[in-house]
Image: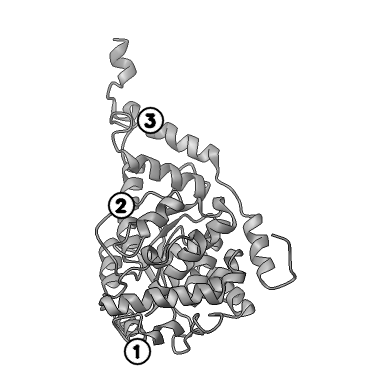
Amino acid sequence: MQPTGLPFDDIRALIRDIPGPDEKSRAETQAREAQLIKPAGALGRLEEIVAHLAAWQHRSTPRISRPLVAIFAGSHGVSAKGVSAYPSEVNRAMLASFSNGHAAINQICKAHDLGLKVFDLAIEIPTVDFTEGAALEEAACAATIAFGMEAVANGTDLLCVGEMGIGNTTAAAAIYAALYGGPVAPWVGRGTGVDDAGHARKIAAVEAGLALHRNALKDPLEVLRRLGGREIAAMAGAILAARIERVPVILDGYVATAAAAVLHAIEPSSIAHCLAGHVAAEGAHAEVLKCLSLTPILDLGLRLGEGSGAALACAIVKTALACHTGMATFAEAGVPGKASVLHS
């Protein structure tokens, strides 16, 4: 895409210049894995996960000492169209629950020793209803992406990206429909549990948004600002910053993946450092993961959001790394390896 002189150009430049993986570290990690006291490949995908960490941390011995779950909270104007089973006032109540340690994500983080930060993205000020105008101005969207980039603090070595915001499954569905096309209905799920009438309103809202903005949806960043929201923009920024800072990412569910989908549409390799924490029981999340060539770590029927699936997957990732770093090699344990048996 040709430069326009507008605020999104800085974002495009960052994506164009992002660093790639460290294949030397990946190979060294795989070489150690092959010497651990187990049959080759016996830990299945756990072995792949450790190699992934090595490549994107640029470390032959990966580490997870400061994992962070980052929740981005935003408010959506389209919620006024009756697309959610809950009113927008729930946004503020949920932020209070996070602060008080009462939400599900608080318990998951406590159980698995994960850091947690919640970012309030002007929760009292909803975006413009995307059925009536662009959700965000370009400068505001670019600034929100930049804000999300600041969430990757020094020392974070694994980032779990999550969100909260009434109406944001509608925004995510609109993004997917714009990026991938086809009939709208398959992209639209039940979100917070809307009834048939509410589901029909969600579909109608997405269709109206696509129709209103149809002439501007070839640019993924325009898709983001016109149909998305502040939390989705901020998550895109966090994912991008993590790549620059050599921090692997675990994506949460349906809405968090929308941020990755925008980056992927700009440059497919831009999300190569990401793992899909789980496949959500919402909309067409499984289909989206196929579009992004991501295989989920977990499939638990979750549709909560707030980083819950990514945090649970983080426990698996930490376990994978613990096995890799804590297990002995055949030589260290004095156990005859396969080659020794064959030549004895």
Residue 244, percent from left and from top: 58, 58
Residue at 34% across / 52% down in the picture? 318
Q: In the image, which disc is placed on residue 316?
A: 2
Check if mark 1's residue and mark 2's residue have beta carbons within 8 Å: no
Residue that carries the numbered disc 3 in the rendered image: 34
Q: Nearer the viewer, residue 338 or 240?
A: 240
* Mark in the foreground, 3 or 1: 1
Residue 130, percent from left and from top: 50, 80
Task: Look at the picture and state if 322 lies above or below 257.
Answer: above
Q: Nearer the viewer, residue 201 or 275?
A: 201
- How many numbered discs? 3
At label 1, counting other C-alpha atoms closer than 10 Å, the crowd grade (few under 14, some 14-19, many 20 or more) is few
Q: Is residue 101 visible?
A: no
Residue 210, percent from left and from top: 51, 72
Which numbered disc, 1 or 2, marks the residue that appears first in the sequence? 1
At label 2, counting other C-alpha atoms closer than 10 Å, the crowd grade (few under 14, some 14-19, many 20 or more) is some
Question: Could you tell me which secondary element the residue under label 3 belongs to?
Answer: loop
Q: Based on the displayed image, in which of its 4 quarters is residue 159 positioned?
A: bottom left
**Residue type (three-letter) at the residue carrying disc 3:** Ala
Residue that carries the numbered disc 1 in the rendered image: 89
Q: Is residue 98 visible?
A: yes
* Mark in the foreground, 1 or 2: 1
- For the N terminus, the quadrant is bottom right
Q: Nearer the viewer, residue 115 or 278?
A: 278
